[in-house]
Structures are given as C-alpha cells and as structure tokens.
Image (spheres, helix red, strand yellow):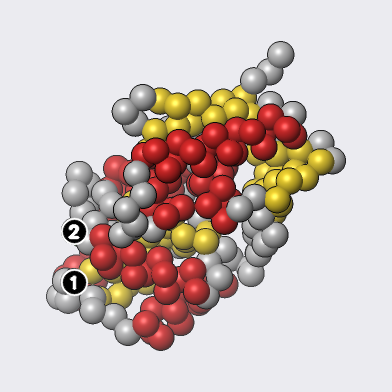
Amino acid sequence: MQILIVEDERSLAKALKKILEQQGYFVDCVHDGLSAIDYAKGLEYNLIILDVMLPKLDGFEVIRILRKDGVSTPVLMLTARTTTGDKVTGLNSGADDYMTKPFDTAELLARVGALTRRRGDVVVNNIDYEDLTLDLQSAMLSCAGQSVQLSHKEFEVLRTFLMNPNMTVPTETLLINGWGMDSEATDNNVEVYVSFIRKKLKYLGSVISIKKIPKIGYRLEVNRS
Ligand code: CA
C-alpha cells in the first residue's frame, strides 16, 4: 500500500509518515500543492492524505485538478479548519473523507484502513519498471533472471525513483525518504547511495540508469541501444 502525504508542517508530515510506516504502508511526503499534483499523477497511490492550507496551491485546488485529470485515488483531507463550510467544500471538490487536526492516531488509522480497503484490498508486492522488478517485501532487485539484495537506504532511494519514473526526483525527497526529515544527512549521502544503486543496475545489466540533474535531483533514464 502506497500513501502520499501532502503536508507543509514538516514535523506533522514526519510524524504521520512514521505512524503509517509502522503499520506497513509505504509513504512519500511532499510539502506543497504543485508537488502533490506531480506525485499523484506520476504514480498510482492507494491513498492521498491532503492538507488544505498549503504553499503554491491549496488542497481544494489540488483535488479539483486531480479529479478533473482523471486521478481517482481516494483522498483523506486533513486540516486545522473545523467549520462545516470547509468540510462541505472538501467533500464537494472530490475528497473521500475529512479529518480535522489535531487528530487521534487510532481514528486516523481506522480511516486510512477504510479508504485503502475500498479499492479491493490489492496488495502491491512489486514495482515493475522497464526490465526491473523491485520486491517491496524482500528489497530484492531483479532484472532478466538475476537478483541483488538492496540495503535499506538503497531500497528507499530506488523505490522513490521507480514510483516516479518520469520525474526528476528532488534530492530533498530522496533525503527525506531514505534518511528521514530530521536527519543530518546531506546531498553527498544521496550521491553515495545513488552510486551504490548505479553499480547494482550495471551488475544486473539493466537498461535503466540514474542521471544527475544539477541543482535539482536525479531521474531515471532508459538506455535503449
Ligand atoms: Ca498546512
């Protein structure tokens, strides 16, 4: 189960990510409305947890754009606002459920469980992209009958790429997914792990490579000869 958290309060985003990961969900975090749209269109998430007050584009606009563009991923809106008017706006704009902050963890998990089950309990075990298969349980990366074991950070970094294969993934996103929001890891740590992954991709003979986009991040490239 893959969940996208859209929340600009980083401490809250981090806490939510931790709570959900403890329950076995895979979680990506973004912190503004435009990134939310990029991510939500780039991958089939099972659920989007969406704050209302966000930089660049507010949550209501985000959900309107996603629904207009045919993204039907369930959305749980999460907001500090408590008025009935906002609740109606949220549900009218296409949200599936609504919770106000501060929320109770047990209630959040119950709602997340209900919304992610709605899609028929499809459990995603692998991510496939081009000639690669990443096993989400064992962190084994396979290509053409060969497999290598990924370390935890290699797995988190590569998983982030494979879930967003057509995007330049910001270095910051890789840092958050691999090392956590409060970590003191830097761009150099990401570079080192990307180089480890590159070696494994080369060993497997994959058509996929990872290209650095200076000052932004990295993206996957498909090398067809
Ligand atoms: Ca906010």
- Residue 222: quadrant of the picture: top right
The amino acid marked with disc number 2 is Met
Labelled disc at residue 80: 1
Residue located at (34% from left, 70% from top): 15
The amino acid marked with disc number 1 is Ala
Labelled disc at residue 36: none
In which quadrant of this rendering is ligand 1 seen?
bottom left
The quadrant in which the N terminus is found is: bottom right
Question: Dot 2 corresponds to which residue?
Answer: 53
Comes first in the chain, label 2 or label 1: 2
Disc tally is 2
Q: Looking at the picture, how far across and down is residue 69, in whole percent?
A: 42, 42
Is disc 2 in contact with disc 1, using a CB cutoff of under 8 Å? yes
Residue located at (27% from left, 48% from top): 33
Q: Residues within 10 Å of mark 2 (few under 14, many from 20)?
A: some
- Residue 210: quadrant of the picture: top right
- Does the closest atom of ligand 1 sit within 8 Å of the Cβ of label 1? yes
Residue located at (53% from left, 52% from top): 153
